Image (cartoon, helix red, strand yellow):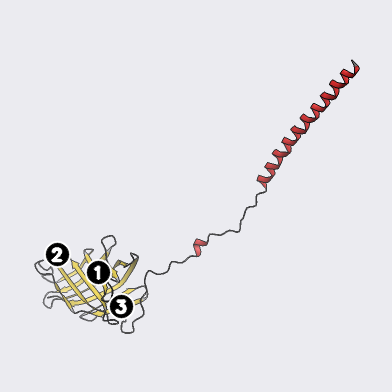
């Protein structure tokens, strides 16, 4: 009987020890997981490198010594700026579209820096140029900066971007139209380029 009691007692002690060891193991494991979560290093020195990335211009043109920005453009000439480059040239033709009651006109001609490049501008107005007119502005215009050596225009306007032409003055007695143009045009790759300081002075027939 005494041995049986001792057997039960030792069995109880062994089971109790096993339970205590298992319970302690769980607590340690939980504490370790908690510690690992609390000690994850955080990198506070990381910076956003996107702020330092600069976008290159969509297209650049070499400076042309023959082209200088002037406040008063000469008759038969055109000019405009892309970025810091001023491009200019002359007209080989200019005039009204036939059959449209002098509500539309065009002018085109080569660049002074390259005979293979030049512009074509077509303008559509809401009123006819059948008398002296001043300060007419329209978004109904088309602009092309062409290259005879390429199947694609260097720059062209599209209906998805605003391009504006202003008739500052039209003198009916002489047929001379003077104005400005500016707006967004597209490269052959579809990138947008902003034209500024556009000027023209032509005789319309």
On residue 143, the disc is 1
Question: Picture coordinates of residue 204 (x, y %)?
Answer: 14, 75
Q: Please name the residue that numbered disc 2 is placed on.
A: 127
Q: How crowded is the residue under tag 2: few (<14 C-alpha within 10 Å), some, or many (20+)?
A: few
Dividing the picture into quarters, in which one does residue 106 lie?
bottom left
> Which percent across, then down, holds residue 120?
22, 72
> What residue sits 25% from the left and 72% below the top?
180
In the displayed orientation, state which residue is furthest to the right. Answer: 2
The residue that appears at 71% across and 40% down in the rendered structure is 31
Relative to 79, is 124 on the left or the right?
left
Q: Nearer the viewer, residue 196 or 34?
A: 34
Residue toward you, 54 or 201: 54
Query: Where 90 falls versus 180 (above or below)?
Result: below
Provide residue 59's location: percent of width, then percent of height.
36, 71
**Secondary structure of the residue carrying numbered label 2:** loop
Disc 1 versus disc 2: nearer the observer: 1
The image quarter in which residue 109 lies = bottom left
């Amino acid at each position: 009987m005494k041995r049986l009691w001792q057997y039960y007692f030792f069995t109880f002690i062994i089971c109790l020890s096993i339970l205590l060891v298992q319970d302690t193991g769980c607590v340690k494991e939980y504490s370790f997981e908690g510690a690992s979560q609390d000690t994850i290093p955080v990198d506070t020195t990381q910076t956003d490198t996107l702020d330092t990335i600069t976008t290159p211009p969509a297209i650049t043109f070499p400076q042309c010594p023959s082209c200088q920005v002037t406040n008063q453009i000469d008759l038969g000439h055109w000019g405009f700026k892309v970025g810091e480059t001023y491009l200019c040239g002359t007209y080989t033709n200019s005039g009204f579209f036939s059959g449209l009651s002098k509500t539309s006109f065009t002018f085109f001609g080569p660049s002074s820096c390259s005979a293979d490049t030049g512009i074509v501008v077509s303008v559509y107005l809401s009123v006819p140029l059948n008398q002296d007119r001043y300060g007419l502005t329209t978004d109904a215009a088309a602009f092309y900066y062409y290259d005879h050596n390429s199947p694609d225009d260097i720059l062209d306007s599209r209906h998805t971007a605003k391009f504006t032409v202003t008739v500052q003055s039209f003198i009916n007695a002489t047929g001379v139209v003077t104005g400005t143009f500016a707006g967004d045009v597209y490269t052959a790759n579809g990138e947008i380029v902003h034209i500024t300081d556009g000027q023209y002075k032509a005789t319309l027939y």
